[in-house]
Amino acid sequence: MKAGKIADIIQRLGVILVYVVLWMPIVILVILSFSSHAIGLRWQGFTLQWYVQVLNTPKAMEALKNSLFVSTVATVISTIGGTLAAYGLYKYKFRGRSALRMSVLLPITIPYVVTAATLLIFFTQVIRIPMGYITIIIAHITFSAPLAVFIVLGRMARVDWTLEEASADLGADKLTTWRKVIVPVLLPAIMISAALIFPWSFNDFTITYFVAGVGTMTLPIYIFSLMQYCRTPVVINAISSVFVVLPIIGLLLVTFLQRKETT
Amino acid sequence: MENRQSIPCVELRNVVKRFPGVLAVDHVDLEIEQGKIFTLLGPSGCGKTTALRLVAGLETLDEGDILIDGKVMNDIPPYRRNCSTVFQSLALFPHMTVEGNIAYGLERRKTPNHEIRKGVGEMLELVGLEGMEKRRPSQLSGGQRQRVAVARSLVLKPRVLLLDEPLAALDRKLRKEMQVELKRIQGEVGITFLYVTHDQKEALAISDTIAVMRAGKLEQAGAPDEIYNTPRTKFIADFMGASNILSGKVIATGDGKLQLETDSGLKVIALHNEGTGNNEITGISVHPELIELLPSDAGLEGDNRFRGRVIEMIYQGDFIETKITLSQTGELLTAHFPSRLEMVTRLSPGEEVLVHWSPKSSNTLLA
């Protein structure tokens, strides 16, 4: 009885510890973004001035807009492409299919710096296109599409594929079956991958930094340049809070969709 | 139109389907009468589902012809075949309501809205799901889902409804209810059903005609009582529960009876059927419920009376499954003795018994 109680307490402490480690720095960051301290390192009283300042810095807003644009395009293409790829990997039998299926997450395990350098060589030496938003978007698709493939494949394994036959049997052609049956059935998984890919793409610094070229600015790159060259990097806390809020929205969306999927 | 009755609704002519390494359907010929329930019965892997999928057009056949209403269907895609399938998993669209599921086929045919509504309404009434139209499949019970699947197919008014083990997922009680329900629905709409099952009781309960398949081949087709009472082969006899199978040769005929000596030397009597030659007969089968228990002083005079010893008794409710070894030759028989008989309840393993079955209960086997 007593031992059980102790185990229970240890378990609870463990959970608390994990969440403290996970969230403490972020919570502090968000709190300090409201601090009136000159360089945002201590609490000195509540203010919204940094947020106002960010809103009044055209460069910051520009970077935010760029980031939203890049991430939206990358998310849409990765999710659609990933879904189609997953369908192909699931449905069609061909040589090397299982190897391909297993290696789908491999790109994620490669260090970002390596991926980034490889992409840089690819863009400058192989296909020779100028650095800019196009290269950033391609790069983001490269590392986020596998995630969509992985998530949608997982869902496909639990789909009753007789649905496809039933649809055909009831007179639907392939396209109609996709539109009316397959996509709706896979939609929760598709949305979950989008919800995970978007913040991932939005937050990426390393790869973007390599392939951005001159004069292209996403939010993470802007923050990095602030930290490097700005004398009073006080707005960083405020901007960074954006990165906290976005994934939380994404996370809530995922939870919501998962709940919907299980009911 | 008037000769429509004489044309079989579905006809398979010498149909062959191969999968890598297996002959799934092996030169099958069959005819399905208009407006009847025709069941393909057999153990799993016997090719019955493949045969159904060939009729549906979900598989392409390698040899032979499939005809629906006298027209060759070999190269016609599933949705132009005028047949509709109820799948084993039911395959209801989970993201659509009951209404959406039933309307799906009509929508694909570009049926006007008011007709779709009318058709869906009629189907809901037919299958007894009025008021459920806004529910999703996940909010329905197993039996209700079953009804939706049937309605979704029937709303298209197909010539044949193909049902692939549709009741496999239901529990025993519900399955029985749904068998009755399917038969009622079939009677009301008059559409031909091609029904696939591995459950011989279900086949007996639901069918007008049963065709038993084994390893891709059609072994016997006939009315349920014919298949049950006079299985032609050991395989079917065993499959239909006539578990007493005695292999042997005919040694004498006369008086409308024949005498058969089993491999172990037991002499049994069966009725002699003029149509079959004596050397075609390879044995007999007897249903366990046709074996009777006689008082031990009844004597051995008469046909098919044997002494034996009870070795096992398994209580099954209305009957007691009793295993008996015959004293004379050591053959193991299974008898289902009615548990209401006092003589039976007094029985216990190890006891000597006298058993009997009538010559007409001996069904002669040809293979």
Image (spheres, coloured by chain):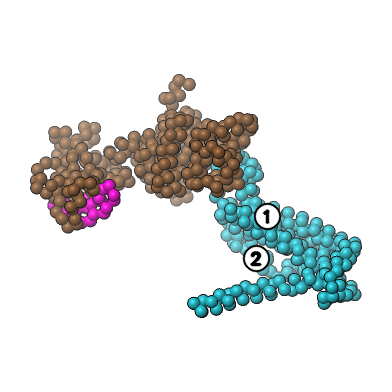
Chain colours: A cyan, B brown
Number of the front mark, 2 or 1: 1
Q: Total label count?
A: 2
* Chain of the residue displaying label 2: A
Q: Assign a secondary structure to mark 1.
A: helix
Q: Assign a secondary structure to mark 2.
A: helix
Highlighted range, magenta: B309-333
Q: Where is residue A250 in the image (x, y as percent from the top left)?
A: 71, 60
Above or below residue B232? Residue A91 is below
The residue shown at (14%, 35%) is: B254
- Is residue B313 found inside the magenta-colored segment of the image? yes
The residue shown at (60%, 40%) is: B100
* B55 or B193: nearer the viewer: B193
Q: Where is residue B314 in the image (x, y as percent from the top left)?
A: 26, 54
> Mark on residue A191?
1
Residue A224 visible in the current orientation: no
* Chain of the residue displaying label 1: A
Q: Which amino acid does label 2 sit on?
A: Leu
Q: Mark 2 points at which residue?
A: A106
